[in-house]
Amino acid sequence: MEISILLAEQILAMFLTMAVGFGVVRAGLFKTEDSRIISNMVVYICNPCVVVHSFQIELTDDKIKGLMIAIGLSVVLEI
């Protein structure tokens, strides 16, 4: 449950970032060319940081077990 709440918070943060960017361009504060630069920055810098930050959670035995199951299943699927 904790992970789904964290994920929802991160999705909301990305949506708000997108909405602010859309509003700024729509209001004429930035040109369309400027929005392309900002979009690249968000995609290549901010989003990876948000993803890494969202995985900063307490490590428990259940989470390690789930990780091992996921790794095992991904190896089986690759084979």
Image (cartoon, rainbow, N blue to C red):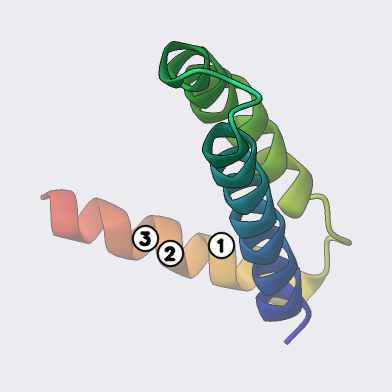
Q: Residue 67 got which mark?
A: 1
Q: Are marks 3 and 2 in contact (CB under 8 Å)?
A: yes
10 Å crowding of disc 3: few (<14), some (14-19), many (20+): few
Tell me which numbered mark, 1 or 3, is placed earlier along the sequence.
1
Callout 1 amino acid: Leu
Callout 2 amino acid: Ala
> Residue 60: x percent and y percent?
83, 69
> Residue 9: x percent and y percent?
74, 67
Q: Residue 12 got which mark?
A: none
**Is residue 42 rendered to the left or right of residue 54?**
left
Residue indicated by mark 2: 70
Q: Nearer the viewer, residue 53 or 19?
A: 19
Residue indicated by mark 3: 72
Residue furthest front in the image: 28
> Residue 38: x percent and y percent?
57, 20
* 71 up-or-down from 44: above or below: below
Residue under the image location 37 percent in, 60 percent down: 72
Q: Are marks 2 and 1 in contact (CB under 8 Å)?
A: yes
Residue under the image location 66 percent in, 25 percent down: 29
Q: Quadrant of the N terminus?
A: bottom right
Q: Are marks 1 and 3 in contact (CB under 8 Å)?
A: no
